[in-house]
């Protein structure tokens, strides 16, 4: 087991404890609590960047080939990786962009639907249809990503 995976639960527990401590500190002294939360965010961002750098520098994983050498297995695994890597990045951008757009749309339409339903409860069905249409934006991005991954 990788040391990253072994240490992950400890890091998560530490982050939760630090967040709870920062919130408790925020109740006593707001300015100090905000500084503690910003420090915690900076620490988590530094950890995420370290993991990202480690992932970028990692060697590609290869399966053992019966009679071939390891170098031919690496060459076969990385053959055509430029186009498939671009397709995967495009798929990630499609899913992320559509999910963020759907979240913004659901936030606005959901709050407007709740406000309208508080005045007239009988429009529940029509309001939920509008919110469902806003959620469809994320599904479109997912479909595009499946198409891109299928082309890779």
Image: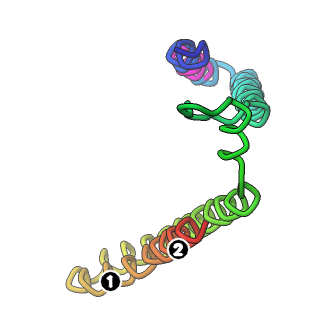
Indicate yes or no whether the magenta region holds residue 71: no
Figure check: 128 above or below 104 = below
SS class, disc 1: helix
State which quarter of the image contains the C terminus.
bottom right
Figure check: 3 above or below 140 = above
Q: Earlier in the sequence, mark 2 or mark 1?
A: 1
Q: Is residue 41 visible?
A: no
Quadrant hosting residue 59: top right
Q: Nearer the viewer, residue 55 or 35?
A: 55
Disc 2 from disc 1: Cα separation: 27 Å
Quadrant hosting residue 14: top right
Q: Is residue 49 visible?
A: yes
Say left or right for 151 vs 142: right
Label 2 sits on residue: 147
Figure check: 61 above or below 83 = above
State the extent of the magenta-drawn residues as a range: 13-22
* Picture residue at 73% right of the left edge, 62% below the top: 86
The colour style of the image is rainbow
Give the image location of residue 145, x and y in percent. 55, 68
Q: Nearer the viewer, residue 5 or 77?
A: 77
* Contact, mark 2 vs mark 1 (Cβ under 8 Å): no
Indicate yes or no whether the magenta region holds residue 16: yes
Say few, some or many: other residues with alpha carbon within 10 Å of mark 1 (under 14 / 14 to 19 / 20 or more): few
Say left or right for 151 vs 69: left
Q: Nearer the viewer, mark 2 or mark 1?
A: 2
Q: Nearer the viewer, residue 79 or 44?
A: 79
* Picture residue at 36% right of the left edge, 81% below the top: 116
Which SS does the magenta portion mostly show?
helix
Give the image location of residue 52, x and y in percent. 73, 35
């Amino acid at each position: 087991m990788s040391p990253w995976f072994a240490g992950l639960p400890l890091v998560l527990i530490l982050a939760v404890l630090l967040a709870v401590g920062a919130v408790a500190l925020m109740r006593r002294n707001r300015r100090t609590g905000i500084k503690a939360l910003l420090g915690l965010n900076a620490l988590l961002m530094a950890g995420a960047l370290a993991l990202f750098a480690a992932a970028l520098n990692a060697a590609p994983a290869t399966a053992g080939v019966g009679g071939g050498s390891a170098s031919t297995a690496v060459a076969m695994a990385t053959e055509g990786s430029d186009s498939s890597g671009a397709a995967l990045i495009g798929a990630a951008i499609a899913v992320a962009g559509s999910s963020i757009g759907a979240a913004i749309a659901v936030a606005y339409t959901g709050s407007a639907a709740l406000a309208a339903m508080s005045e007239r409860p009988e429009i529940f069905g029509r309001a939920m249809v509008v919110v469902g249409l806003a959620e469809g934006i994320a599904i479109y991005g997912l479909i595009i990503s499946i198409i891109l991954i299928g082309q890779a």
